[in-house]
Structures are given as C-alpha cells and as structure tokens.
Image (tube, rainbow, N blue to C red):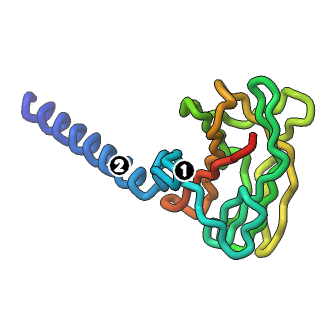
Amino acid sequence: MNHRWLAYGGIGAGLVVAAIVAVLAYQSLLVPFGTKGNGGSASTTPAPAAGCSPSPCADVQGYLLLISNVQTSGDLVSMQVTFRNSSDSTHASPQDLSLIDSSRHSSTLVTGPPGCSTWDHHEFNNGQVFGPINICFRVSTTAPPLTLRWSPDFGFFCCQTDIVISGA
C-alpha cells in the first residue's frame, strides 16, 4: 500500500516539475518587459517596420496595430486602435490588449466610461482592416511610461510585444 502512494506521489511531483518547465519555456519565448533602450528608459518597442506608421504602432509578422489619439483623464487612459492584418493570425480580440503603467500595474479594457468601447472577437480575412476602435484602461498612475501590451494569437507559442506610448 505504501509503495502505491509513493508511486502516485512521484508521478504527481513529476507532473508538477514538467508543468513548471513548460511555463518557464513559454515565458522565455516572450518579449521581455523592461529591457533598457536608448536613454536608459524601459522599452521593448519594436522598431517601426515597413507599413508600421505613424508611431506608436507594432508589426508582428505582418499583423499591424496602430495607436492614435491617446488621452488621459484622471486614472483613465483612452486611445484609438486599428488592426491591419496580412498575416496568419485569424482574429482580433479585446483580450489581446492590456495597459501597463509605470508602477507595472496591468489593466484590461474598461467599458463603463462614455466613449470607451470594446468589441467581440473579430474574424479577419487576409489584408483586412478593423477599426479604429475607442478603448480605455484604468491605471494606478498616468506617469510615463505607459505601455500597451499586445498578444496577438498566432498559436500556442508565439508573440507578445510592448508598445511604449509617449505623450499620454
């Protein structure tokens, strides 16, 4: 009887170790947050790629996110986002976006305040444009830098990029 429990315990411990290794491997594939850029400020903003302008924007394998009209009011940050897709990603989802403030607090979209929208999962055909959409986030501080984290869906292991939003 004791050998059976010992075997179950060993199998359980092995599964826990395998899960931890899998999570760590996945996190190592992500773009790190807070690497030092020019001037010593934290930034993982990708260099503007062909077709990725005006800044701030990001191009992940031909899937572009364009950001405009960034405004702050108290603890509310609002902006317009537009998706332009010519990649293998099949959709845009509000769950793909979060805003990280300078105290590293992560916020998801809010829809209560006037002018703050969301959308349902939007399916793309190759080359489609979706937006602009007015979106908002509640933050703990509006002090720079504000960083929009975008995690488009290209499968289980892929992409995440941080877009530093200046002038907010």
Tell me: 44 left or right of 72: left
| Quarter residue 14 falls in | top left
Q: Position of residue 30 (x, y in %)?
A: 47, 55
Depth order, front residue of 101/150: 101
Depth order, front residue of 2/47: 47
Residue neighbourhood size for the residue with mark 1, other residues' Cα within 10 Å, grouped as few (<14), some (14–19), many (≥20) = many
In this rendering, which labeled residue sits more in front, label 1 or label 2? 1
Tell me: 86 left or right of 140: right
Local SS, label 1 = loop
Extreme residue toward the right, this view = 114
Local SS, label 2 = helix
Kind of residue indicated by mark 2 = Leu
Q: Where 70 falls versus 88 (above or below)?
A: above
- Which residue is depicted at the point 79% across and 71% down? 125
Q: Position of residue 11 (x, y in %)?
A: 21, 42
Q: Position of residue 167 (x, y in %)?
A: 74, 43
Tell me: 26 left or right of 146: left
Q: Quadrant of the N terminus?
A: top left
Residues under labels 1 and 2: Cα distance? 22 Å
Q: Position of residue 130 (x, y in %)?
A: 84, 60
- Which residue is depicted at the point 70% across and 46% down? 166
Q: Which residue is mark 2?
A: 24
- Which residue is depicted at the point 73% across and 37% down? 109
Q: Which residue is mark 1?
A: 43
Depth order, front residue of 51/90: 51
| Quarter residue 17 falls in | top left
Kind of residue indicated by mark 1 = Ser
